[in-house]
Amino acid sequence: MRRPGEPLLHDWIRPGDTVMWGQGTAEPLTLTRALVAQRASVAGQGRVRVWVGLGFAGTLHPEHADFLDFVGYICGAAQRGLSQAGVLDVVPAHYSQLPDMIRTGALKVDVLMLQVPPPDVEGRFQLGLAHEYLGAALDVARTVLVEVHPELPQLQGGLSLGPERIAACFDARHPLVDAPVARSGPVEQAIAAHIAGLVEDGATLQVGIGAVPEAVYAALVNHRDLGLHSGAVGDGIVALAESGALTHARKSLDPGVGVVGILLGGPRLRAFAHRNTSLSLRGTDYTHHPDVLAAQERLVAINAAIEVDLTGQVNAEVADGVYVGAVGGAVDFLRGARRSRGGLPIVGLPAQAGARSRIVLNLGGPTSTSRADAGLIVTEYGVADLRDQPLSVRVRRMIDIAAPEHREALEREAFTLLPRAGAALDRAASPPSPSGT
């Protein structure tokens, strides 16, 4: 089954097929680069469809659309050119929907390409750095191609597959993919400090990816008995564990074990995860299941955004007309945290992008999270708790956490958005009338 040399993919991929692979750090570069290089011979007189997940390696480029069609749920920085060129067809789905979409055929998967560590003593392979929706793809894919990478850690939990399920197996010819290092500055650290002040000891964390989430890890090192239940996890989790803050001891589900769908880090995270019995890789069916999240007490969901409007609507997808993010799992976790006893649904973002406010009257892109799902919005200027609040209160609280230089303009705009909210703002700014007038 093990095949030396460069993979020749036309033996397994047919014209009209949809190809999927592990996203982010789990991308099997030997196979994906072979697909790009051989796309003309693989597609033949037809075309091949590629499912685009989060990408860090820069494998896919607009010129590859000569034989490949791109469809996916997200557009990472390394794939921004696909969106700008108009060759990425976006599926605006909640992350929790992806496994069912795969199993029902709404998202067709013909060929699945995986990166795996060397087999165990029984000859079986683990899934590597990601489980996520790959288990559903394994259920339906006609062909499974595997790249074996000797530097991958051995992880607890997750699926394994035997040689009978694998059409062909190749040795990795490229280094592992590392996630970009998220750099946080004073703004991100201030946001993280506000969020850390909301988190109780014993809480279970879901943390997204990016500069603000990574800063949150650092801000929580003095907490105790924190747990983890997250779709993704970055390098910052290692310092949190080493500080003694992350023990998973008080989790209501999976006590003593952190649950995660994909590791999005570098060598430090991989070393931490290797044979770590306190960390378990699980599929999206579990990490994002609404009943699982609701049953996890004190679930704190911490996610990022591009912008938030004055009523709590969140855009996490489009900036300046370009698709740069995703619906993703934010709504899944925000709703789960809202149902969790003692849970906190949090969205954190800097108040400005350059000189432009990210607290806005009208979103510049789609509504990724509705205002009905809004929880606590956090900027470097404070926390706006929108839960169960009428629009007039929401508008006031959102203006209070906007950058000071934008607050006056936002107050003026609030009158056009919602006269009642504008009137409430006007009354709050004016001294009370003398008695009897």
Image (spheres, helix red, strand yellow):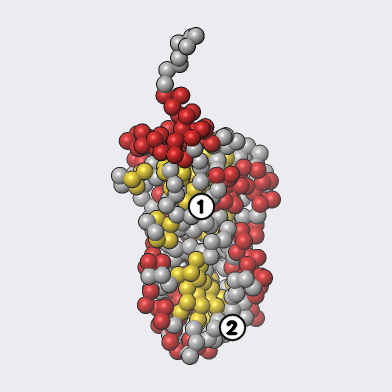
Q: Is residue 295 above or below residue 50?
A: above
Q: Secondary structure at mark 2?
A: loop
Identify the residue under disc 2. Answer: 167
Name the amino acid, label 1. Answer: Thr
Q: CA distance from mark 2 to mark 1?
A: 42 Å
Q: Residues within 10 Å of mark 1 (few under 14, many from 20)?
A: some
**How packed is label 2: few (under 14 Cα within 10 Å), some, or many (20 or more)?**
some
Observer-nearest of 431 and 245: 431
Q: Picture coordinates of residue 379 (x, y %)?
A: 42, 39
Question: Is residue 266 shown above or below 145?
Answer: above
Question: Could you say where residue 339 lies in the image, as x and y percent from the top left?
Answer: 65, 43
Nearest the viewer among 68 and 436 is 436
User: Where does the N terminus fall, quadrant-wise?
Assistant: bottom right
Residue 204 located left or right of residue 23: right
Residue 174 in percent (x, y) is at: 41, 74
Q: Could you tell me the amino acid type at mark 2?
A: Ala
- Answer yes or no: is residue 213 visible: no
Q: Secondary structure at mark 1?
A: loop
